[in-house]
Amino acid sequence: MTVQDYDVLSRCHPAVNFLFFAAAIVLTVVLFHPAYLLVSLLCGGAYYAVLRRARCIKTLGFLLIAMVLVAAVNPLFNTLGETTLFTLFGRPYTWQALCYGGCAGMMFAAVSLWFLCGGIVMTSDKFTSLFGAVIPAISLVLVMVLRLIPAYWRKGKQIAGARKCIGRSGAGSRREKIQGGMDVLMSLSGWALEGSVITADSMRCRGYGAPGKRTSFQIYRFTGRDRFITGLILAALAAAIYAAAGGSARAAFIPAIAIAKAAGFRPILGLASYAALLLIPTFYSIREAILWHSLRSKI
């Protein structure tokens, strides 16, 4: 079963995918307010769970640990703040720096989740289809770079598994482990060089570098569903920006904590529209899953 089988956003036009993830990531970085960051973190985690199912647990656990570490380590470097909790190595460990680190950790985890979701939904063919005609060289380079680390990671695991099957897992002393790791790295480097030559030959045969304008075949069409979801995204985005522009997302931590209260029309509108924006793909995926099981039960 592919992602497209149970995720509605994955079946939308690449422009809709790009608009949603660009809005989610940019707003997560810009709106440095605890409530907004928490909403982004929860919505990103929910959508990542929809996309990855049970395989999301390890990643979510890692991001939770990273978030706690960022919050705990920040006061060690940033000693500003008027409330000192205790002194460590002669440096004050302040409450304001700890709160700032907590928000920074939430932002890191939320942005990471949205990038992970975007990497699953925004496939290389969608990226090339969206930007290939405008910036063909840059779009191709970005696609190749974005797939580099996952492809190397998968191939490295395959090489290590093959070596383990022939009794050369690299287990034993530290020297044997280092030697085993170097052997895997050498094999991976050879595979990468061979792949680059094959890719270059394939690109040359497909017309890359040839004079004249290249044409491309578009398999994506902007349907009525795409227009409707785009309208939802733009409406929720406009409402969130309107509320944030009025100061409802303002937050300061140094030297004293000053956070805009989530009370009144604008703050409630901002949080509600922000949550509605980020929950669009999760809502549609859950709605379609419920509808599918309901129809299947009637057969």
Image (spheres, helix red, strand yellow):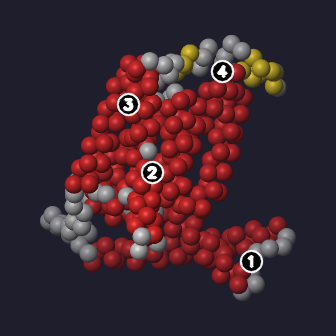
Residue ID at (30%, 48%)? 229
Q: Which of 145 and 161 is in front in this view?
A: 161
Q: Which mark is residue 96?
A: 4
Secondary element under disc 2, as helix, strand or loop, is: helix
Does residue 151 appear in the picture of this structure? yes
Q: Can residue 113 be seen in this view?
A: no
User: In the drawing, what numbered circle is on residue 282?
Assistant: 2
Marks 4 and 2, how far apart at CA: 34 Å
Image spot of residue 132 (x, y percent): 26, 59
Residue with the mark numbered 1: 169
Q: Choose mark 4 or mark 3, whichever is in front.
A: 3
Q: Which residue lies furthest to the bottom in this view?
A: 166
Where is residue 298? Give x, y as percent: 42, 70
Q: Nearer the viewer, residue 224 or 191?
A: 224
**Element marked by disc 4:** helix
From the viewer's perspective, is the residue at label 4 or at label 1 nearer?
4
Q: Nearer the viewer, mark 4 or mark 2?
A: 2
Tag in front: 2 or 3: 2
